Image (tube, rainbow, N blue to C red):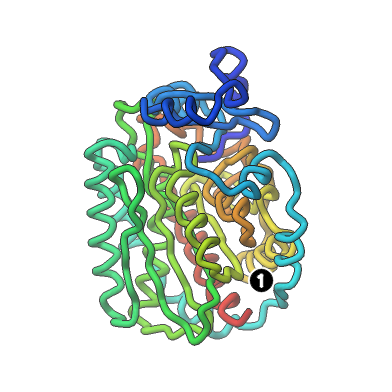
Amino acid sequence: MHYKSCVATLLVTLGLTTAASVGDADFQARVKAGLRLIKTSPTDQGAWVTDEEKINNYTGKCAHFVDITDIKDQDVLRAYSGQADNSRVAAAARITYPAVSHQSEANGLIAQLNTSGPQTWLKTLTDFYNRYYRSTYGTQSATWLFNTVKSISAANSRITVSQFSHSYAQPSIIVRIPGTSPNLIIMGAHFDSTGGTTTARGPGAVDNASGVVVLMETLRVLANARYAPRNTMEFHFYSGEEAGLLGSGDIFRNYKSAGKTVLAMVNTDMAGYSPSGKISSYNDYSDTGLLAYVRRVITAYLGSYTTDTCGYGCSDHASAYSNGFPTAYVCDEPDVTSTPYIHSPNDAYSTVSFTTVLRHTKFTMAFLIEANYL
């Protein structure tokens, strides 16, 4: 989900009740009634909507928002209100991101990547009627993904695959390759989809089955190689992204509470449509040091890149960033030339470029091997 250029002014047109007019008792009553509190910008005080309104009137109309109903951490709320957290900036600055220097090791693994699995997996993902996080199809797709990722990981018995449960039925999935250090390098991608309404056909091919299969293929090669990292590597497959970053929000809230150390979280959202033929490295919700490091890796392994900004709460890296973790976001194209089929029944398998998918898979492998030595 990234769509900076689409409609982003729906609060004014819909005239919804803001959070500022609601007390604590009223807050709980609204939640119990099935309403959700969303923000559409740093200055927006929040609006109460139904889940159907979230998808039909916001996601379906390409309006950015974050669901903040379950966020109690004031630092996170301040982050979503555009207030700088100097402590997180200082923490990120303490991480040293070095020059690229492990090409020989990375290239040996990159040579084993291909598009055979990604084509099969992406076809299965897009064959679900949709992967809307509250639909039966959404739950079925999560079960299929969990079982498939477990099968891919089985080549290395040290890899663990777990489901992360939420308040809704569609779980997120976390794959962990344990290292000698508990410090985490995280690659993330959401697997839910929408066709523009809660009931529409939503194949979600580029957004974001393409990002999902990038992670799956990278995992396949690492598992088959029985790769033993220094830093612990995690692959995150998030649910509920299209409903306001729900899955990633829960996970990074948990990681912050648990005091986990994340050296880098790189989000891949849309990796299958690229007229430019270059990876796009986005500027917002990114830490300066990690962003520069991501771009060094892209340059060393793939050549030049494009840049852009994606806007308010545009994808799951915003959850990690707002919880204080160093983040970066890679996409297949700047916003203005990205797929025109986002959040519609036309985001179909036939629109995916597997050359683009492979390009992102090479980057993902290269980044993981380089970041293994942070």
**268 w.r.t. 5: above or below:** below
In the foreground, 57 or 114 = 57
Residue beneath the point at 44% across and 38% down = 242
Label 1 element class: helix
Residue at 68% across / 39% down in the picture?
A: 81
- Could you tell me if residue 129 is visible in this image? yes
Q: Nearer the viewer, residue 32 or 325?
A: 32
Q: Position of residue 169 (x, y in %)?
A: 28, 44
- In the displayed structure image, the side of residue 84 where residue 221 appears, left or right: left
Residue in the picture at 28% in, 51% down: 142
Count of marks overlaid on the render = 1
Q: For the residue marked with disc 1, what is the amino acid?
A: Ala
Q: Residues within 10 Å of mark 1 (few under 14, many from 20)?
A: some
Relative to residue 137, is residue 31 depicted above or below?
above
Q: Which residue is mark 1?
A: 300
Q: Position of residue 198 (x, y in %)?
A: 34, 28
> Which of the 4 quarters of the picture holds residue 32?
top left
In this picture, residue 89 sits left or right of residue 7: right
Above or below, 57 relative to 222: above
On-image quarter of the C terminus? bottom right
Query: Where is residue 161 shown, x and y percent of the image?
Result: 32, 68
* Residue 55 visible in image: no
Residue at 68% over, 64% down: 290
Percent coordinates x, y for residue 359 in the rendering: 51, 60
